Image (tube, rainbow, N blue to C red):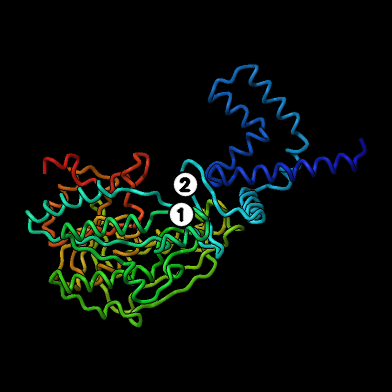
Amino acid sequence: MGKDIVFIRNMVLTVAFVAFIGYNAHNTKALDNLEDIVDVVFPTKKSIEIEENKFNITKVQKNKGKILADCLNDVSKNINDLLPYQEKLVNLSGTLMRATGIRDYYNSEYAINVTTSDYIISQVGQTSTDYEVSQMIQLKKYLDKQGIRLLYVNEPAKYIDDDIFRNEFSAETYLNRNADLFLKRLSEAEIEYIDLRDNIREEGLNCNDLFYRTDHHWTVPTSKWAAEIIAKKLNDDYGYDIDLNLYADENFNYMEYENCWLGEQGRKLAESYIGMENYTLIVPAYDTSFSRNINGSLTEGDFNIFIDYSVYSDSYDMDWEFQPAKLKGWHYSYNGDGCIQNNNADFGNVLILGDSYERTLIPFMSLGIRNIYKIEPRYMSSKDIQAVIESGDYDTVILTYAQFMIGAHDNPDNANYRMFTFFEDTSDN
């Protein structure tokens, strides 16, 4: 066989295996498992030795691995020359997926759907809302006995009309119908709530402008917008007197970053498929003063104590493995965790039960409230939640939940399974 024919054969095999690896990179959580895929298809001596030590591979299995390695030796050499870094492999796989027009990705851990406008959304199954409503009713009774007011805030997800999903993907989602049913039942139980979807409709806003394209979280400007709506509700119905001018757009400084990071969902698709994300950093232009206690560690300062500026640093770009686009979502640069005291406010002691949306929401909510403390029920037992409530002298408990938390208790494997578990046995309360 001539050298030219051998070269052509090797290149054809190389392209075929690149496509194979690219496909599997997306279906097996590309960033986490990519090295494993490469080692399975092109086992190196080191990787074979590691597997032998880990699993006590038999001689027959060892021979099979050697045969596979020998058969693919030429292709392995070419693939290693062509793809020296994981970043290139991930982006190549993203290019292949985009070229084939695939917009739906599923595996045992997640489902991702990409709209024709490159906006990532997800499907949600139907739920009865029975568990969530039962727990909310019990929580309301429990708080009433202690003289604590309850407020539920329905934080929207990335589309507020289920027809959008049906029209894009010819499939059903119940994201908004679940929320509609849940909130209707809260109203019947006389539990106060804010449905931020109503505000979106009333103000004529577009969900695409309120959320990141490549991440399930809302943007920093959306968090500030939501905080003002909650502040107004507290003023109108909960006896607060928060100065709403604190939220006026002209009272903030804005820093715009373009094509700077990749969201949690986008990382599963690759930059080459979905493109990088823009980001807006917002801080008050007026004087602020806070004290924050996280697990006994006290920090004092202005609004900037809520922001980890190292996430935006160029030093992250020195090595691909440590770029924020691949390592840490910029959403998490804000952190509203801990016990927060606003030294410029004199009223309000609020307990927030929330999720990761609150990383950016709580810093803005804290601008008009004396004390805020946030917990995440998914990490806590019901007894621990009750202990926090009983030890804090709170005037208000606010549940601020992303809409897709409704129904999470239907699946014990769901990371949000315990978000509505405030009482293990509701018959005792």
Q: Residue 224, how many percent across, how many down?
A: 33, 71
In-image side of 54 versus 43 (left or right) = left
Q: Quadrant of the N terminus?
A: top right
Q: Residue at x 20, y 47 (%)?
A: 422
Q: Residue 38, how many percent across, how many down?
A: 64, 39
Camera-near label (1 vs 2) is 1
- Residue 278: mark in rendering: none
Question: Can residue 316 be seen by looking at this rendering?
Answer: no
Q: Residue 92, how many percent across, how many down?
A: 66, 52
Q: CA distance from mark 1 to mark 2?
A: 9 Å
Mark 1 nearby-residue class (10 Å; few <14, some 14–19, many ≥20): many
Q: Residue at x 17, y 74 (%)?
A: 236
Question: Can residue 159 be seen by looking at this rendering?
Answer: yes
Q: For numbered disc 2, what is the local secondary structure?
A: loop
Q: Residue at x 68, y 20 (%)?
A: 63
Identify the residue under disc 1. Answer: 122
Q: For numbered disc 1, what is the local secondary structure?
A: loop
With respect to residue 352, does 382 lie above or below?
Answer: above
Q: Are marks 1 and 2 in contact (CB under 8 Å)?
A: yes
Identify the residue under disc 2. Answer: 110
